Amino acid sequence: MKRKQIVVLGLVLVIISIGILQYNYNTSGESSNPDIDTLVMEQDNDLEDIPGAAVYVEGSDVTDEDLEKVQQTGGFFAEMRMERDKARSKQKEELASIAKASADGTVAASTTITSLQAQEQLLDLIRRSEAEATIETLVKQIGFEDALAYMSETRNVDVLVKADSLSAQEVAQISDIVVRHADVTMDKITVKNLN
């Protein structure tokens, strides 16, 4: 009973501390600045001139065909990424259950994979997933709208990039990213564009 009272008292103190910090922030922080409407009226500015202001933009320039095209290609990348992640999750679960069953001794000794092998394969799968995510993020950062990377067990890396075409320089940039983060040679890399 005494322990519960101490925990409750600790939580109350944390809540009070947060309240005090919030009060101090509101009186001296950004939230005490005049609101956007006041700034616009006083300085006779457009909302577009104020950093961080939300501005409504009418989207009448976008046709239904353009929207459908974007949804199809964007949908492809999202769907492929989801399929890859679903397959990887299934593999991870299987390897984790094999490793656990082997460690517990509940699996027969005649199985083809040992607990250590299952753990190594699971670790390799996690490393490949992390490398793929890193490659995708870095490829997007160099200016491509979307990218999908897939690294096979044989260390071949396929990179799909959402672009009309790819120049030799862009392929070289993407390949450099893959070489650095997937630790593979150039002959194991395939870069393709998808419009």
Image (cartoon, rainbow, N blue to C red):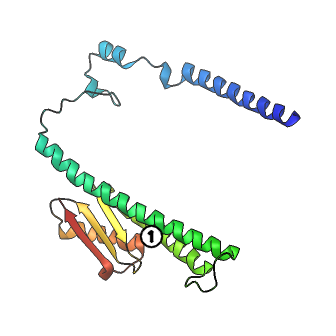
Q: Say which residue label 1 marks.
A: 128
Q: How far across and down, in percent of the image, does residue 57 sit?
A: 21, 30
Question: Is 86 left, or right, of 41 in this rendering?
Answer: right
Amino acid type, residue under disc 1 in the picture = Arg
| Residue at left offset 70%, top offset 25% | 16
* In the image, farthest residue toward the right: 2
Which one is in front, 30 or 59?
59
Whether residue 134 appears in this view of the structure is no
The x, y position of residue 91, in whole percent, is 48, 69
Quadrant (top left, top right, bottom left, bottom right) of the N terminus:
top right
Quadrant of res 96: bottom right
* Residue at the image position 37 percent from the left and 74 percent from the top: 179
Q: Is residue 113 visible?
A: yes
Q: Could you tell me which residue is drawn at 42 percent across and 76 percent down?
A: 183
Q: Position of residue 140 (x, y in %)?
A: 31, 56
Q: Position of residue 27 (x, y in %)?
A: 56, 19
Number of residues whose C-alpha sits closer than 10 Å to that of mark 1, classed few (under 14), some (14–19) or many (20 or more): many
| Residue in the picture at 28% in, 57% down | 77
Q: Quadrant of the C terminus?
A: bottom left
Residue 107: quadrant of the picture:
bottom right
